[in-house]
Image: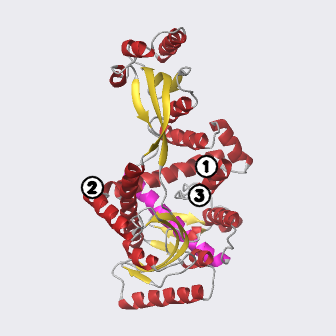
């Protein structure tokens, strides 16, 4: 399953492929032959950049592969081309804005993300690279595509995410509301179609959008496939995923969806839902919830040696091995931690880290810790903080449902606010840009 998730991640990343602005050729370079110009003709002008046909073709190929993997029949070529090109335009606009703001993703950050992707699929970076190239992809291209997607994520974080604030009172209010409705733990798997209207739309534009949305709803009521219509007609961010919004609780989804959802049964499609952004249609795919959250916790302690002016990394590797030998010879862990560990907070407590849950430590530390039986001491473990020796004291199953639910509600509110602000920001970015489509030119 992890390998399948890995392949799916590659497909999603590939959706952002080929969004770099094509450079103008130097004046002393002769024009390309007509065949080359036709093969890589301009299909869109986006501000001072362009999108060429090879970029569009690559993106369409990737989307078709994704739809095939999901078993979804794609729309006709022209419809799919329009949706994919619009996505490329929006990505291009974001990359242009990031560049104008002096943003970039350095190689250190990129290499770290590649390592995380490989580690998440139980692969080394070399194995990860081999799989990419065995599937016919260029590893260098994959890295640059990943760099672009990371840059877009960072841009969105700065432009949208950093402005999102969630107060404790908002969390209290939503928790109370969810408990009162008896739906605090319930999650809904939704699909979504949006017929968008521009900012400051004229009455004629609003009426045209409503008529279009009404026609889509009529086809859905006549048993048209929701996923295919979303791919062909929706202006939503998940259009090319068949409108799939994933699993959301009532607190996570836009407020205008909450009331219509209460009357829907699994498989039902809503009436038109009006918002400032346009006309929405949602479909309830699945429903789940009302579960306790049990977390495995580990009581552990450690000794840490950090690189400094007096001790190099190589020195610390020798020192940590010497401490390991002393521990295995029977010396007391707490005593050695107090006198040797450079984690001053835990050293004062004999190296005690308290109860740790998943994600509380860096991956290398957590992986080594999870392999230990109670009382067992690890071999030296290297992380970005230095060299560690770890001892697990005990494990327990902890019911943290209350804390988990509060954090979940806070994240739901943040996600809902982020989604709403991102939609408005992207719409403004698109509306204020100069975009000229040339996809029908030969």
Q: Decide: is 53 above or below 208.
A: above
Residue 398 x, y percent position in the rendering = 45, 42
Residue 83 circle label: none
Q: Is residue 25 magenta?
A: no
Q: Decide: is 407 above or below 208.
A: above
Residue at numbered disc 3: 12
Residue at numbered disc 1: 142
Disc 3 secondary structure class: helix
Q: Is residue 237 left or right of residue 29?
A: left
Question: How far, Cα to Cα, is label 3 from label 1?
Answer: 12 Å
Q: What's drawn in magenta, residue-wise?
A: 77-101
Q: How many marks?
A: 3
Residue 233 x, y percent position in the rendering = 55, 79
Residue at numbered disc 2: 168
Is residue 80 something one can see in this rendering?
yes
Q: Alpha-carbon neighbours of circle 1 within 10 Å: few (<14), some, or many (≥20)? A: some
Between marks 2 and 1 in the image, the one whose residue lies nearer the viewer: 2
Residue 241 x, y percent position in the rendering = 58, 67
Disc 2 secondary structure class: helix
Residue 59 x, y percent position in the rendering = 62, 63
């Amino acid at each position: 399953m992890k390998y399948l998730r890995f392949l799916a991640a590659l497909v999603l990343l590939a959706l952002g492929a080929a969004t770099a602005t094509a450079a103008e050729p130097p004046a002393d370079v002769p024009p390309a032959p007509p065949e080359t110009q036709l093969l890589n003709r301009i299909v869109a002008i986006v501000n001072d950049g362009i999108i060429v046909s090879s970029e569009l073709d690559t993106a369409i190929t990737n989307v078709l592969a994704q739809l095939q993997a999901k078993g979804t029949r794609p729309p006709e070529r022209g419809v799919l081309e329009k949706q994919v090109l619009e996505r490329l335009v929006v990505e291009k606009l974001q990359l242009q804005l990031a560049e104008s703001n002096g943003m970039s993703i350095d190689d250190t950050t990129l290499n770290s993300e590649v390592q995380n992707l490989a580690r998440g699929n139980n692969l080394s970076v070399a194995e990860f690279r081999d799989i990419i190239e065995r599937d016919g992809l260029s590893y260098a291209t994959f890295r640059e595509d990943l760099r672009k997607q990371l840059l877009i994520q960072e841009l969105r974080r700065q432009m949208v995410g950093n402005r999102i604030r969630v107060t404790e009172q908002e969390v209290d209010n939503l928790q109370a509301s969810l408990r009162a409705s008896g739906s605090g733990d319930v999650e809904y798997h939704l699909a979504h179609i949006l017929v968008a209207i521009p900012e400051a739309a004229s009455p004629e534009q609003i009426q045209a959008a409503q008529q279009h949305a009404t026609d889509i709803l009529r086809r859905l009521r006549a048993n048209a496939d929701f996923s295919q219509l979303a791919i062909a007609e929706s202006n939503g961010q998940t259009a090319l995923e068949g409108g799939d919004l994933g699993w959301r609780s009532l607190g996570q989804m836009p407020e205008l969806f909450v009331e219509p959802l209460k009357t829907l049964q699994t498989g039902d499609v809503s009436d038109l839902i009006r918002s400032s952004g346009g006309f929405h249609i949602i479909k309830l795919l699945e429903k789940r919830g009302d579960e306790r959250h049990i977390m495995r916790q580990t009581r552990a302690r450690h000794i840490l040696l950090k690189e400094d002016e007096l001790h190099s990394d190589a020195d610390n590797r020798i020192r940590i091995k010497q401490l390991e030998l002393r521990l295995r010879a029977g010396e007391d862990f707490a005593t050695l931690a107090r006198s040797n560990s450079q984690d001053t907070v835990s050293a004062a407590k004999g190296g005690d880290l308290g109860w740790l849950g998943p994600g509380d430590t860096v991956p290398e530390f957590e992986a080594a810790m999870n392999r230990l039986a109670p009382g067992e001491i690890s071999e030296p473990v290297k992380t970005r903080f230095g060299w560690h020796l770890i001892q697990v004291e005990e494990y327990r199953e902890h019911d943290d449902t209350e804390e988990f639910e509060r954090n979940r509600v806070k994240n739901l509110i943040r996600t809902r606010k982020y989604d709403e602000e991102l939609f408005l920001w992207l719409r403004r970015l698109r509306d204020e840009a100069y975009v000229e489509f040339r996809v029908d030119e030969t």
